[in-house]
């Protein structure tokens, strides 16, 4: 299952071509991205959203909170790695303390004790690490199943999926992995129920709204300057990584990783 997820992302990132007539300077692969957006929307509408609605109906909120805390504790492990690579010792120490406290006194992360204790969530990824190393500007890329991303962030996700993580302590077999990631995906989707309606009501083109909101959010987080805000010529690292073809086939469904 893990290799399937990795192959999906690598395939999307390694195919090289440039789509024509983009509606935004940071979305040169718009035909591919729109096809992935439509695929994700169809999957969500027919499978993921109904599962999340049923999950909300049959599970009490304290249980859903505990599940979110458990997966969040694992995300802190990846934040620890990212902040270490970014040479952010204070944030890395904070992440280490969060994982240590929540994994022990918080019953393997089911209870978030660290946040009330003043240890903030420094959720960062390898995409943030690459940005801190100089790869700030990156083209928009819609990943199947994972949703909005960039070439930079997608590359970081692909690397993260290829290395052993704390989740390997939880499962050994494929059915166990499917249950592990399935619960994660449904729990995350339950938190976002209602968001799709707000997006549809806020814009004529949900794809454009989602893309622009994501890119402005990531620009603020990484210190990037979106193309329409600058006339400076910069080396496009995305071209060195590769871009997806507009007609790229849809890979078999992966599952989310915490």
Image: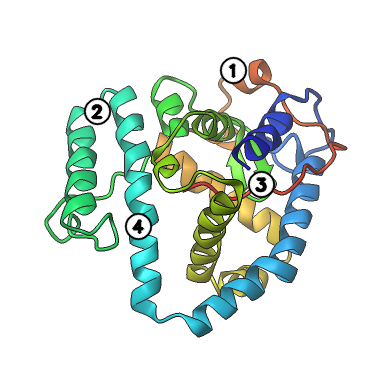
- Residue 203 appears anywhere in the view: no
- Please name the residue shown 22% across and 36% down the image: 91
Q: Bin the neighbour count of mark 3 within 10 Å (Cα to Cα): few under 14, some 14-19, many 20 and up.
A: many
Of discs 4 and 2, which sits in the foreground?
4
Residue placed under numbered mark 1 in the picture: 233
Residue 254: mark in rendering:
3
Residue placed under numbered mark 4 in the picture: 70
Q: Residue 10: x percent and y percent? A: 67, 29
Q: Residue 148: x percent and y percent? A: 61, 47
The disc, 2 or 1, on the residue closer to the chain's N-terminal end is 2
Element on which disc 1 rests: loop
Element on which disc 3 rests: loop
Q: Residue 177: x percent and y percent? A: 55, 49
Of discs 3 and 2, which sits in the foreground?
3
In the picture, measured across the screen, residue 85 lies left or right of residue 112, that is right
**Marks 3 and 2, how far apart at CA:** 32 Å
**Marks 4 and 2, how far apart at CA:** 24 Å
Q: Are marks 4 and 3 in contact (CB under 8 Å)?
A: no
Quarter of image, res 53:
bottom right
**Marks 4 and 3, how far apart at CA:** 21 Å
Q: Are marks 1 and 4 in contact (CB under 8 Å)?
A: no
**Marks 1 and 4, how far apart at CA:** 44 Å
Q: Nearer the viewer, residue 251 or 198?
A: 251
Q: Nearer the viewer, residue 13 or 203?
A: 13
Specify the farthest residue to the bottom.
57
- Please name the residue shown 67% across and 70% down the image: 200
């Amino acid at each position: 299952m893990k290799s399937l997820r990795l192959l999906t992302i690598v395939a999307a990132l390694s195919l090289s071509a440039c789509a024509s007539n983009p509606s935004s300077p940071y979305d040169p692969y718009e035909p591919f991205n729109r096809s992935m957006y439509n695929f994700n929307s169809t999957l969500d509408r027919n499978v993921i959203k109904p599962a999340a609605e049923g999950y909300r109906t049959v599970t009490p909120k304290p249980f859903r909170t505990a599940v979110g805390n458990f997966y969040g504790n694992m995300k802190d492990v990846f934040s620890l790695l990212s902040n270490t690579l970014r040479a952010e010792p204070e944030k890395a120490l904070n992440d280490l303390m969060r994982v240590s406290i929540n994994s022990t006194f918080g019953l393997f992360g089911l209870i978030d004790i660290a946040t009330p204790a003043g240890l903030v969530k420094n959720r960062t990824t390898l995409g943030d690490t690459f940005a801190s190393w100089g790869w700030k500007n990156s083209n928009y890329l819609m990943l199947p199943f994972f949703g909005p991303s960039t070439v930079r962030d997608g590359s970081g996700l692909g690397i993260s999926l290829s290395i052993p993580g704390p989740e390997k302590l939880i499962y050994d077999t494929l059915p166990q992995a499917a249950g592990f990631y399935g619960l994660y995906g449904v729990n995350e989707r339950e938190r976002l129920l209602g968001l799709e309606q707000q997006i549809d009501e806020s814009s004529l083109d949900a794809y454009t709204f989602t893309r622009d909101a994501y890119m402005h959010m990531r620009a603020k987080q990484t210190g990037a300057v979106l193309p329409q805000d600058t006339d400076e010529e910069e080396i496009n690292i995305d071209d060195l990584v590769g871009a997806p073809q507009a007609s790229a086939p849809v890979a078999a469904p992966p599952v989310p990783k915490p």
